[in-house]
Image (cartoon, grey):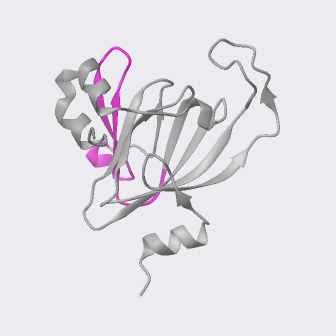
């Protein structure tokens, strides 16, 4: 019997994401910024959208992008979005539909913020959507190195070790 996670991966034509989990691009605007800023020297679409699926046994490793990223919860377990802001402030936000448990149905991760995601329920999954503006481009995607993160934010050692790949 196929699991709901496997069914979604198949039906939504999802592929593995470098940070962990699975994704499928659903939208890329035709219009684009023409690379007029220092942060985005090359053209970027105005907006992009994806489905993102993460299983409870998967890890969304710490990474950052140069754009704001809005997360939307669709189905499955709630998730925790772990963020380390540029000033070193750590924040965990719960994305889901249980408002009595301080969960939010959507959240914006600010540009240049390190973040990773965990699924809250065991033996489950979470299907979310991510909207990025200016639009996502892999040139703006940076995976966190464990050593560099521990040097920059030693006070967050436990979560950094959980959401980064071991140094080889």
Which residue appears at 60% of the width and 66% of the height? 12
**In the picture, which quadrant includes the C terminus?**
top left
Eyeballing the image, is 2 above or below 86? below
Which residue appears at 51% of the width and 75% of the height? 7
Give, as a single range, the part of the protein colored magenta. 73-102
Eyeballing the image, is 64 above or below 50? above
Most extreme residue toward the front, as rendered?
168
User: Residue 152: image x %, image y %?
Assistant: 28, 18
Report which quarter residue 88 is drawn in: top left
In-front residue for pair 144/98: 144
In-front residue for pair 31/103: 31
**In the picture, which quadrant includes the N terminus?**
bottom left
Is residue 155 left or right of 102 when viewed as pictured?
left
User: Residue 143: image x %, image y %?
Assistant: 43, 35
Eyeballing the image, is 131 above or below 52? above
Give yes or no for residue 22 being in the magenta stretch.
no
Which residue appears at 52% of the width and 30% of the height? 65
């Amino acid at each position: 019997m196929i699991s709901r996670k496997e069914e979604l991966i198949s039906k939504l034509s999802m592929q593995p994401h470098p940070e962990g989990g699975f994704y499928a691009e659903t939208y890329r605007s035709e219009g684009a910024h023409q690379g007029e800023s220092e942060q985005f020297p090359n053209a970027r679409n105005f907006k992009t959208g994806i489905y993102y699926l993460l299983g409870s046994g998967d890890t969304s490793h710490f990474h950052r992008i140069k754009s704001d990223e809005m997360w939307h919860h669709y189905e499955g377990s709630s998730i925790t979005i772990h963020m380390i802001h540029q000033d070193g402030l750590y924040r965990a936000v719960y994305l889901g539909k249980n408002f009595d448990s301080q969960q939010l149905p959507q959240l914006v991760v600010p540009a240049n913020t390190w973040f990773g995601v965990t699924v809250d329920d065991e033996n489950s999954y979470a299907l979310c959507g991510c909207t990025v503006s200016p639009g996502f481009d892999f040139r703006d995607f940076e995976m966190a190195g464990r050593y560099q993160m521990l040097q920059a934010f030693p006070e967050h050692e436990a979560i950094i070790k959980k959401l980064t790949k071991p140094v080889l």
